[in-house]
């Protein structure tokens, strides 16, 4: 399950930030997880707690910012929210929308003390 | 410990020709660390905006630069388990041997069997065992590279762990991903695992020798792949009978690794 290794990456990013920015405890972590990214939200929640143990974010609250997918039609240029990467353009019916948003996986911000 | 960012990995086992069991590199996290200047303990918000895959992407970039410098065409072969990646590779290596420098990196959770199958052709192979890991990442590839002679001006095939899901998200520094779909898997796989088919430049539809015995609609499978990725190239072949292999070899020869000494 790769969510565990991704949660481990989140931990490393947070630990590095705690050294760079001088905080010792993290209360809340905001993760942006696009609906079309390769991360399953529930699996990330499950792994997050375990991955943060023994670090500055142990026990931190996880807030997931869930961004919808957006596609740009290559044929007619229409931009729309899409649920799957293979959705047809709602304007002209063409397949193969180019993904313009919704595949990000980011540590957005932390509430620290 | 890696040279790119000082990270270390303890679970992954890399088996090259020289070393079967390398001692684990010690993890030294103090390498980059500057004494923190501890601020007052007030509550505040720290903005990071950091990509979770940032570390992988940095390693992938380092690999890519090395491949470009050496004029190596690096390909990342992805598929579900058992689609025929190793069988296809063995056949491909036999066809290309003596014409280009070649090398293979094999990724599996366990065993060295696939690397051994490759080595019977005489082409150097390094086996990466990911343990519980379900995909190769850029750092594993970076660690595997010093374990074999690099195929300068030739082709490096990287066979990923059999898994149609997460290898799509991990850049290894390759020139292109090649997805193998075998006809015993069902037409719907491109729709069910769209990320992989979207990430690939080429789809090899393997085991076509079995089509007479199956109910598999080739046109439908291909239309699903194109729905997910309108630019995908598709080649029908059989790694066992050899039908279609020539089209795959031609595709390989037409690729231009973005390097200086493009020999291909
Ligand atoms: N009939 C037929 N069988 C094939 C073909 N290619 C591979 N096979 C068989 O499919 C099985 C799996 O092949 P492998 O080459 O080990 O597949 P793989 O993708 O490397 O498997 P993993 O590395 O375990 O994911 C073997 O029994 C092969 O003989 C083909 O074109 N036709
Ligand atoms: Mg194999
Ligand atoms: Zn359109
Ligand atoms: Zn590193
Ligand atoms: Zn994985």
Image (tube, rainbow, N blue to C red):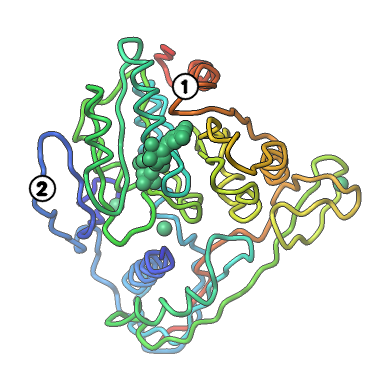
Q: Earlier in the sequence, mark 1 or mark 2?
A: 2
Q: Residue furthest front?
A: B213
Which residue sits at x=60%, y=42%?
A: B214
Q: Nearer the viewer, residue B28 or A72?
A: A72
Residue B159 in view of the camera: no
Which image quadrant for residue B32? bottom left
How many tags in the picture? 2
Percent coordinates x, y for residue B125 in the rendering:
24, 32
**Left or right: residue B16 compared with residue B171:** left
**Left or right: residue B101 compared with residue A90:** left
Circle 2 packing at 10 Å, graded few (<14), some (14-19), many (20+), is few
For label 1, the residue is B242
Is B188 located above or below residue B232 in the figure?
below
Percent coordinates x, y for residue B229 in the rendering:
67, 42
Which residue sits at x=21%, y=63%?
A: B29
Circle 1 packing at 10 Å, graded few (<14), some (14-19), many (20+), is some
For disc 1, the chain is B
For label 2, the residue is B22
Q: Nearer the viewer, residue B183 or B162?
A: B183
Is B14 located above or below residue B250 in the figure?
below
In which quadrant of the rendered image does the C terminus of chain A lie?
bottom left
Residue B142 in view of the camera: yes
Which residue sits at x=26%, y=26%?
A: B150
Comparing labels 1 and 2, the label whose residue is closer to the camera: 1
Q: Does the Cβ of the disc 2 residue fall within 8 Å of ligand 4?
A: no
Is B196 located above or below residue B245 in the figure?
below
Is B76 located above or below residue B133 in the figure?
above
Which residue sits at x=33%, y=72%?
A: A15
Residue A10 marker = none
Percent coordinates x, y for residue A5 in the rendering:
37, 64
Q: Nearer the viewer, residue B119 or A18?
A: B119
């Amino acid at each position: 399950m790769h969510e565990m290794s991704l949660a481990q990456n989140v931990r490393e990013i947070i630990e590095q930030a705690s050294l760079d920015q001088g905080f010792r405890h993290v209360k809340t972590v905001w993760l942006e997880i696009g609906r079309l990214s390769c991360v399953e939200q529930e699996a990330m929640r499950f792994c997050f707690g375990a991955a943060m143990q023994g670090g500055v974010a142990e026990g931190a609250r996880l807030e997931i910012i869930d961004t919808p997918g957006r596609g740009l039609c290559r044929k007619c240029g229409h931009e729309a929210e899409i649920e799957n990467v293979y959705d047809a353009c709602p304007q002209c019916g063409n397949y193969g929308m180019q993904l313009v948003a919704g595949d990000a996986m980011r540590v957005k911000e932390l509430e620290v003390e | 410990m890696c040279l790119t960012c000082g990270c270390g990995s303890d679970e992954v086992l890399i088996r090259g020709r020289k070393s079967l069991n390398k001692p684990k590199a010690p993890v030294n996290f103090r390498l980059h660390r500057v004494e923190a200047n501890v601020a007052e303990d007030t509550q505040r918000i720290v903005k990071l905006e950091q990509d979770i895959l940032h570390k992988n992407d940095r390693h992938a970039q380092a690999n890519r630069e090395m491949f470009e410098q050496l004029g190596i065409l690096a390909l990342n072969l992805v598929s579900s388990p058992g689609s025929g990646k190793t069988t296809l590779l063995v056949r491909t290596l036999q066809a290309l041997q003596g014409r280009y420098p070649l090398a293979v990196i094999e990724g599996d959770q366990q065993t060295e069997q696939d690397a051994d199958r490759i080595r019977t052709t005489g082409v150097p192979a390094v086996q990466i065992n990911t343990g519980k890991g379900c995909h190769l990442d850029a750092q594993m590839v970076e660690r595997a590279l010093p374990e074999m002679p690099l195929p300068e001006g030739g082709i490096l095939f990287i066979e990923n762990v059999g898994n149609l899901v997460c290898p799509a998200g991990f850049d290894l520094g390759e020139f292109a991903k090649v997805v193998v779909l075998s006809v015993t898997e069902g037409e719907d796989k491109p729709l069910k695992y769209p990320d992989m088919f979207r990430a690939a430049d080429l789809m090899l539809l393997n085991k076509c020798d079995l089509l007479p015995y199956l109910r598999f609609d080739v046109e439908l499978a291909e239309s699903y792949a194109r729905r997910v990725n309108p630019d995908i190239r598709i080649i029908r072949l059989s790694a066992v009978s050899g039908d279609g292999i020539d089209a795959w070899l031609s595709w390989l020869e037409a690729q231009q690794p973005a390097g200086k000494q493009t020999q291909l």
